[in-house]
Amino acid sequence: MKKIFIISFIAFFYLPVLAQLKVVTAYPYISDIAKKIGGNSIQVDALASGTWDPHYIVPKPSLIAKVRQADLLIINGAELEIGWMPPLIRDSKNAKVQPGASGFLDLSAHVDLIDKPENVSRAHGDVHPSGNPHYSLNPDNILILAKAICDKLCALDNQNSSLYRANLEQFASAWDAKLKEWGDKLKSMQGIKVIQYHKLFDYFLNRFGIDLVMEIEPLPGIPPTSAHIKKIIDVVKTGSVSLIITDVYHSQKPVKMISEKTKARYAVLPHDVNSVAGVTDIFSLFDEIVRRITND
Amino acid sequence: MRINKSLFIFGILLFFSAPAFCRDSTENKSANTSPFSQVKFLPDISFITDVSGLFRTIEDEEFASMEIPGFIHGGSGEEHGHSHAPANGKTGFNFNYAELALYSVVDPYFELTGIFHLSLEGFEIEEAFFNTTCLPFGFSIKAGKFLSSFGRLNSQHAHSWNFADQPLVNNALLGHHGIDEVGAQISWLAPMNFYLLCGTEVLMGANENSFGNEGFHDANDRYEVKDAKGPNLYTGFIKTSFDVNNYTIYAGFSGAYGGSRINHGLDAAGGHAVFAETWLLGADITQKWYVDSYRYVSLQAEYIYRIMDGDHYHVESDSVTEKTSLLKKQSGLYGELIIKPFRRWKIGMRGDLLPMNRVELSKIDQELPDNMYKVSAMMDCMPSEFSLFRLQYNYDRSKYFEEKLKTNHEIMLQANISIGAHGAHAF
């Protein structure tokens, strides 16, 4: 009697957990898309924090414990996680999520990457041989990612596939409406010239026809020298650049300095969910980027 | 003769007409001309060099013969029978090592890693092991030659250390290669919400400072200790870690047990040897507090205790070997504080201490010195993730020369440069 009681007691607490598919993602934005598709049928956890430089996440042992428990690991890919993810996957000892296994999803395989270098050399800074990995900032790609995640969830958890498909449909129609809204809001920004700190917002700017002039970093991952900043100030002044954009994790000093010297406006843009207050999901991420770019 | 000649001429004609017979390559430009190329299967290859410029107050020759009484003798870890000089051995420039590393997934079941150390004197396999990726329930096995997971620093390669040299305790008890052994390891990661890793290793135990598996005998064959049969060293470890916001704590306990066969020239006058059972117990703790992606403060400490119980053999001046009982109870610890205030700069301090050094021969305390210590300060400049320049100062009060403690000041400038595809380091 006592045994039965204990077993049912344990089962009561563990069954709902066991029934849920455990999804671990590299970044918060992936978690949010997965949550929108998976709903309550999945349990989602992101490894990286939204406020951090996505290239430099510390491979804390607590993250290994998360990967250990995952049924599905979803990464951004395109070498964005190369500096921190490999030891986590190896040390997780989780056969399900090893690259190539059914519980591993590399989202970069589903989108077209830009700036794919023909020749790769570290003399050019932190280059990504597969192309610019920040493709998630093109809102068109979000739908492709949502579909890829939906397909993966359906494959792993066939029982709930009709729910996942329905959620995807609902997400897609909401997203389409938002795409139109953002397009309208950014119409006035078309053709304006901007500079950015790191090659982070290329996909977004390309998508909405905003003219990207150059980066403040002389090479990807290499901070600018004062001589380089002087050069940029000249470019901003002579090239009628009207907006300087940067992210939350780099020092804002050079951006502020260039803005002060040139009178060009600067905007700190969120790059991921949870990177700034108020950006709690994938919708508010793009809402906030649009709001800050248009200075609404 | 004539046939030979015409054959020769025919051969020459045939050779030079070859292009005329070969298929016209311009017609089929789009075809893959190397359908069997395996370039994409190349493993990740990386190459690292470590060079230092060094100044020390003690002369090289004297330094090479200094000892830490009861721990090491004949220089700073230059073990007997060693083929290459220890790192940072000489005043002036030192080519410490070049490291060649290869890694690849083997198939859906295994990964293979090879780390090779090239020095001016030779080639060493530092690590070459395979590990499983497909075992269920959080288990994995690795086998080959690898750095033991005993302690915190032992399993890390020299280029990922925060200082140019090993802590005193690692050098004194484990030697400058650490526990780097042929054997197998099984480890298990618990299915918990926090990190909990347990593992055990079965190793051959060739380590020259605390273990050793080669037997010895004296010149008169009066005493003989046979080679160890099979694995001679067993280790176990448990490691755990959890976070509180941006603060991470990581701690581990380790133990190692094995037979010690340490022979320092027992077959000649003045030689001595040890045959004993040895326990090593280790505890380590790392605390790291992150400010953001690029800045952190970390505190790391490690303690190792050694108990060695057995026999000591000593060749007297008249070539007669004496055997006495030996008991060593020794310990050492280090603590290091690392501050990374900027993305490209790191500063750090390390304190080393050997607080316990009790050595008994025939149950008589040899009254060896204890509390040997060393203090180090360093500053790192990292132009990128692939290049590192380190300035380090050591104030060393651990080395004895002709039974007298001699203070050693060291200043070194280390350059650690890497190219190629090198795997990311674990925490």
Image: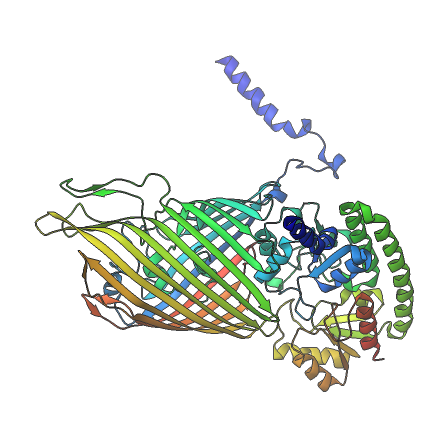
| Numbered-mark total | 0
Q: Is residue B23 above or below residue A13?
A: above
Q: How is the image coloured?
A: rainbow
Q: Nearer the viewer, residue B108 or B283?
A: B283
Q: Is residue A98 visible?
A: no
Q: Nearer the viewer, residue B348 or B49?
A: B348
Based on the displayed image, in which of its 4 quarters is residue B227 positioned?
top left
Please state the horizontal and vertical placement of residue B193, each as a whole percent of the image: 62, 59
Q: Is residue A13 left or right of residue B224?
A: right
What residue is rendered at 59% in x and 41% in y?
A: B109
Please state the horizontal and vertical placement of residue A138, each as a whole percent of the image: 80, 63
What residue is rendered at 70% in x and 79% in y?
A: A255
Return the residue found at the far front. Answer: A1
Please state the horizontal and vertical placement of residue A264, each as a whole percent of the image: 77, 82
**The C terminus of chain B: image quadrant:** bottom right
Based on the displayed image, in which of its 4 quarters is residue A45 positioned?
bottom right
Please state the horizontal and vertical placement of residue A28, each as a whole percent of the image: 72, 64
